[in-house]
Image (tube, rainbow, N blue to C red):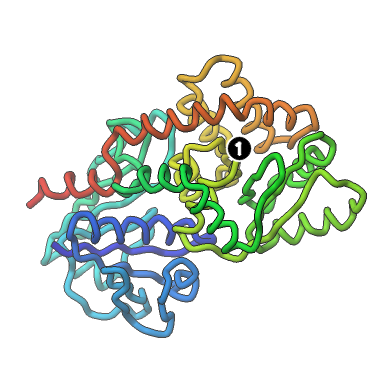
Amino acid sequence: MRWDIFCSIIDNYGDIGVCWRLARQLTCEHGIKVRLWVDQPSVAAKLIPGLDSTLASQHIAGVDVCHWSSPFPPVEVADVVIEAFACELPETYLHAMQNRRPVWINLEYLSAESWVDDFHAKPSVHPQLGLTKHFFFPGFTPACGGLIRENHLLAERSRFQQSKVSQAAFWHGLGMMPNQAYTISLFCYPHAPVNSLLEAIAQTDQPVLCIIPQGQTADHAMQWLDAHPTQDRLRIATIPFLSQEQYDQLLWACDLNFVRGEDSWIRALWAGKPMIWQPYLQEEDTHLVKLEAFLQRYCQDSPSDLAIHMMAAHRAWNRHGFTPSAWQAVLAALPGWQRQAQTYAENLAKETDLAAKLVIYCKKFF
């Protein structure tokens, strides 16, 4: 079978991050021929090693990565067509689908909200073309479409976390060797209350190494550090853009991970380490509704006192920021949080993953 995945890169790297992971997994684990259509190859090249953004198509890691150009080139319609995150298919391709009649999937954004169960896999008929589109919702329950998780992921994570040699080699590759009490990774949207976090760390007793990807947040943090030369509790390290495999290792190696959006959020969950999520900012505080829905699932099996701290940390990061006492509470909760995070990842992994569920769902149409 041949599948086409269409990815329109809207904001940073979240969309292409998910689509590239999915394309590789469908190819490697399910033997499917995948064309990944990307409208901004120059952006995708940050995440797809070896991608030449000047080429119309390239075969990388078993996947045909193609430029979604305008006008769209005449190509044969695939057996399964995935439009990721409600991107609109090219008109010429859409009309060609009338003859081929492929399975048409709209891969939705991830949400932990309960309504997702009811809408997963629901069909919708195109009013002019008569083609049926199926809405596929990733999610946290058996009734949803699952989460992206490669078959080998948790085993690789365990090997890495149990190997001091592997961890030392990873840190050496980044040009550092953490010796602080705590190491945290910080990946957030620009509106995050970063100052409150840095000030809270600086006013508590435990030394912290804060690792931040190069960019606006890192620049802001370094400016803050320059303005507070007398504090000695906080060390900030900026790192270059990492490959997906390297970013997984960063999450596996840190004591606490601040993540955002969708791709880094799910990878942090699989890391089995304490994490604080920042959903994408939405009007009328809809993102806070999504946050609360996730927290109810994330904390449901935790001891009540631990759940209180985990929820408070997420709410502080997504609302008013941290006070020194709130940050101290986070650090105090980390041992129990670590055990909870590992158990949560293991329980999530008992469910069928997203790629497998997509394959199972689409096969019934052939």
Q: Is residue 175 left or right of residue 249?
A: right
Residue extending farthest front: 165
Of 245 and 324, the residue lying toward us: 245
Q: Where is residue 326 in the image (x, y as percent from the top left)?
A: 74, 28
Q: Which residue does the image show at 24% across and 70% down from the upper left? A: 93
Q: In which quarter of the image is residue 357?
A: top left
Q: Which residue does the image show at 32% across and 75% down from the upper left? A: 66
Q: Is residue 299 left or right of residue 64?
A: right
Q: Say whether residue 48 is visible.
A: yes
Q: Which residue does the image show at 39% across and 53% down from the upper left? A: 85
Q: Position of residue 280 (x, y in %)?
A: 56, 47
Q: Where is residue 19 in the image (x, y as percent from the top left)?
A: 37, 58
Of 233 and 309, the residue lying toward us: 233
How many numbered circles are shown?
A: 1
Residue kind at label 1, given as amino acid type: Asp
**Residue 58, placed above or below residue 275:** below
Q: Position of residue 283 (x, y in %)?
A: 59, 43
Q: Quadrant of the N terminus?
A: bottom left
Q: In which quarter of the image is residue 282?
A: top right
Q: Which residue does the image show at 49% across and 26% down from the upper left? A: 340
Residue extending farthest bottom: 54
Q: Is residue 183 left or right of residue 338?
A: right
**Residue 52, placed above or below residue 301:** below
SS at mark 1?
A: helix
Q: Say whether residue 97 is visible.
A: no
Residue extending farthest top: 304
Residue at which label 1 appears: 285
Mark 1, other Cα within 10 Å: few <14 / some 14–19 / many ≥20: few
